[in-house]
């Protein structure tokens, strides 16, 4: 192939070439014909597919969407053919083929693919749905799930645990109980939980429902990480302005009550009426917490949360 600018013989090589997708210009590395004399570059018909795919992937990356390579990798991880993957997503096989060749999937479709292929993404969605639905009842401590509050309560307890000379064993279970006790205390005093988390009864005591998914979500959000199966490390600082003064009181009181007996907290939780009265694997009603120790005067002091 001769250069259309100067007539010199062009070389085939991987080069940086500009391309446009949806009014955005990207420079991609792709197989091109390059003139050694004047530097003119062009992509010949044989390499157009590769070029278009590279531009589409640069666009996808800039928009935070899955690239064609990532799409193929996700499908292969699930050991599905293009046909099976299309059925699984509820789209036509032609769509899957086109995406893998470089056609950019719509934003909504990108979302669907992530939800159906990535467990972390799906877990995050689960908790977002719960928080967005705004449902509040006796199982959520009369507060809709508030992920920001969950995040900072977790950061607080993990931060305090990290300061201890002697760290407790089974930290995920200890954290489960601390969250529950803190929410219980606030319900008891103010008729509303701190986080809106729902808790369930399992053999190990009351735990956020479902705490495995919850910690997976918090891990993905860089709130915590597992140093090993039993050790949790906070990855963000606690922000006390997320809570009101009364709420900080409930949190600090819970920590003071249990900090010297964290290895007993599981056993202590088994003695709580709310736990004992709930059937295995069922959600625990905060109504039991109120029943145990009614304080009508305190309940009337229900405050509003500062924005
Ligand atoms: Zn040339």
Image (cartoon, grey):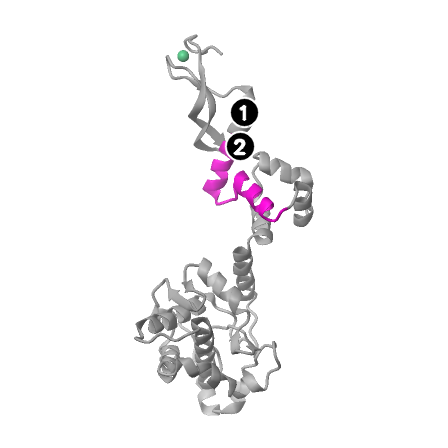
Depth order, front residue of 233/200:
233
What residue is shown with label 1? Answer: 48
Q: Quadrant of the C terminus?
A: bottom left
Q: Quadrant of residue 225?
A: bottom left
Give the image location of residue 138, x and y in percent: 56, 79
Q: Secondary structure at mark 1?
A: helix
Residues in magenta, as a range: 52-79
Decide if residue 22 is in sight here. Answer: no
Q: Residue furthest top?
A: 7
Q: CA distance from mark 1 to mark 2?
A: 8 Å
Residue at the spot 48% in from the left edge and 24% down from the top edge? 31
Give the image location of residue 39, x and y in percent: 38, 17
Image position of 25 with respect to 88: above or below: above
Q: Is residue 98 magenta?
A: no
- Label 1 neighbour load within 10 Å: few <14, some 14-19, many 20+: some
- Label 2 neighbour load within 10 Å: few <14, some 14-19, many 20+: many
Residue at the spot 47% in from the left edge and 41% down from the top edge? 61
Using residue 280 as the reference point, say whether residue 31 is left or right of it: left
Give the image location of residue 104, x and y in percent: 56, 38
What residue is shown with label 2? Answer: 53
Give the image location of residue 194, x and y in percent: 45, 75
Q: Is residue 78 magenta?
A: yes
> Would the CB of label 1 be found within 8 Å of ligand 1?
no
């Amino acid at each position: 192939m001769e250069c259309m600018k100067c007539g010199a013989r062009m070389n085939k090589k991987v080069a940086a070439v500009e391309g446009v997708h949806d009014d955005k210009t990207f420079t991609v590395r792709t197989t091109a014909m390059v003139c050694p004399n004047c530097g003119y570059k062009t992509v010949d018909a044989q390499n157009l597919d590769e070029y278009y795919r590279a531009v589409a992937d640069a666009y996808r990356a800039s928009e935070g969407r899955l690239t064609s390579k990532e799409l193929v990798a996700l499908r292969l991880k699930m050991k599905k053919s293009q046909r099976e993957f299309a059925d699984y997503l509820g789209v036509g096989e032609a769509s899957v083929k086109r995406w893998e060749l470089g056609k950019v999937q719509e934003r909504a479709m990108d979302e669907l693919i992530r939800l159906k292929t990535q467990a972390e993404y799906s877990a995050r969605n689960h908790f977002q749905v719960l928080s967005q639905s705004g449902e509040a009842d006796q199982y959520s401590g009369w507060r809709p799930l508030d992920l920001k509050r969950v995040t900072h309560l977790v950061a607080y307890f993990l931060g305090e645990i990290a300061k201890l000379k002697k760290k407790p064993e089974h930290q995920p279970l200890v954290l489960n109980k601390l969250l529950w006790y803190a929410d219980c205390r606030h319900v008891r005093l103010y008729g509303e939980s701190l986080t809106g988390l729902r808790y369930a009864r399992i053999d190990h005591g009351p735990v956020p429902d479902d705490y495995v998914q919850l910690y997976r979500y918090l891990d993905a959000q860089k709130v915590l990480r597992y140093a090993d199966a039993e050790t949790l490390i906070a990855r963000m600082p606690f922000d006390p302005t997320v809570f009101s003064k009364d709420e900080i009181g409930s949190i600090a009181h819970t920590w003071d009550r249990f900090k010297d007996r964290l290895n007993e907290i599981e056993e202590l939780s088994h003695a709580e009426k709310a736990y004992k009265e709930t059937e295995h694997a069922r959600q625990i009603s905060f109504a039991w917490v109120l029943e145990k120790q009614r304080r009508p005067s305190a309940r009337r002091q229900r405050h509003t949360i500062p924005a």
